[in-house]
Image (cartoon, rainbow, N blue to C red):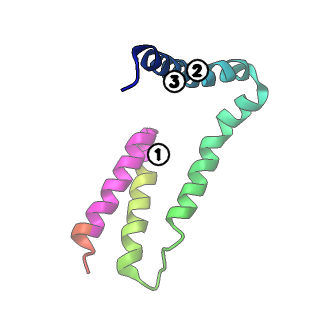
């Protein structure tokens, strides 16, 4: 069994590494908060990310298979409607997801 100084030094190294890894992002990000590039990305990235996510989610929708396409199209309409109504991202995403799950599970079962 290892002796006490060895165990204490191992725990000390683990604590130091853990603390450094948790503190490093804050130290690196502090100067970036006033950056014009970060400000631009902050205002434009959500739209880009959601566009890519939407294209990815709708890539397999084929109108030739209506029982597979309709739940997705209707859930998309629910998502857009909720977002236009309340302007709440979480409500839109969760509402659209719930609508899709309900439509696939209850209405358009195969």
Residue 108 figure quarter: bottom left
Residue 24 magenta: no
Q: Is residue 90 magenta?
A: yes
**What is the distance, in whole Å, between disc 3 and disc 2 at their CAs?**
5 Å
Crowd class of label 3 (few under 14; some 14 to 19; many from 20; radius 10 Å): few
Q: Which residue is rendered at x = 29% and y = 66% of the image?
A: 103
Residue on which disc 3 sits: 18
Relative image position of residue 96 (x, y in whole percent)? 38, 54
Query: In the image, which is nearer the foreground, mark 2 or mark 1?
Result: 2
Left or right of residue 55: residue 3: left
From the top left corner, tell me how far across and down residue 94 is, in percent.
36, 48
Q: Which residues are magenta?
A: 82-104
Residue matched to label 1 = 84
Crowd class of label 1 (few under 14; some 14 to 19; many from 20; radius 10 Å) = few
Q: Quadrant of the C terminus?
A: bottom left
Residue 105, disc: none
- Residue 74: x, y in percent? 38, 65
Q: Is 50 on the left-hand or right-hand side of 38?
A: left
Q: How far apart, in angstroms, are the residues tagged by discs 2 and 1?
A: 44 Å
- Element type where label 3 sits in the image: helix
**In the rendered image, the vertical position of residue 64 relative to residue 89, given as above or below:** below
Snapshot quadrant of residue 45: top right
Are there few (<14), some (14-19), or many (20+) residues within 10 Å of tag 2? few
Horizontal placement of 50 versus 106: left or right? Answer: right
Precedes in sequence: disc 1 or disc 3: 3
Element type at marker 2?
helix
Q: Earlier in the sequence, mark 2 or mark 1?
A: 2
Q: Main secondary structure of the magenta part?
A: helix
Q: Which quadrant does the N terminus fall into?
A: top left
**How far apart are the alpha carbons under marks 1 and 3?**
44 Å
User: Would you name the residue on which mark 2 appears?
Assistant: 20
Tell me whether circle 3 and circle 2 mark residues in contact (CB < 8 Å).
yes
């Amino acid at each position: 069994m290892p002796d006490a100084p060895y165990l204490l030094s191992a725990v000390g190294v683990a604590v130091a590494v853990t603390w450094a890894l948790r503190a490093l992002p804050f130290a690196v990000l502090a100067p970036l908060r006033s950056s014009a590039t970060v400000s631009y990305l902050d205002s434009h990235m959500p739209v880009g990310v959601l566009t890519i996510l939407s294209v990815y989610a709708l890539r397999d929708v084929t109108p030739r298979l209506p029982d597979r396409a309709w739940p997705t199209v209707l859930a998309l309409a629910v998502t857009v409607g909720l977002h236009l109504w309340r302007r709440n991202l979480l409500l839109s995403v969760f509402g659209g997801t719930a609508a899709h799950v309900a439509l696939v599970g209850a209405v358009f079962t195969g």
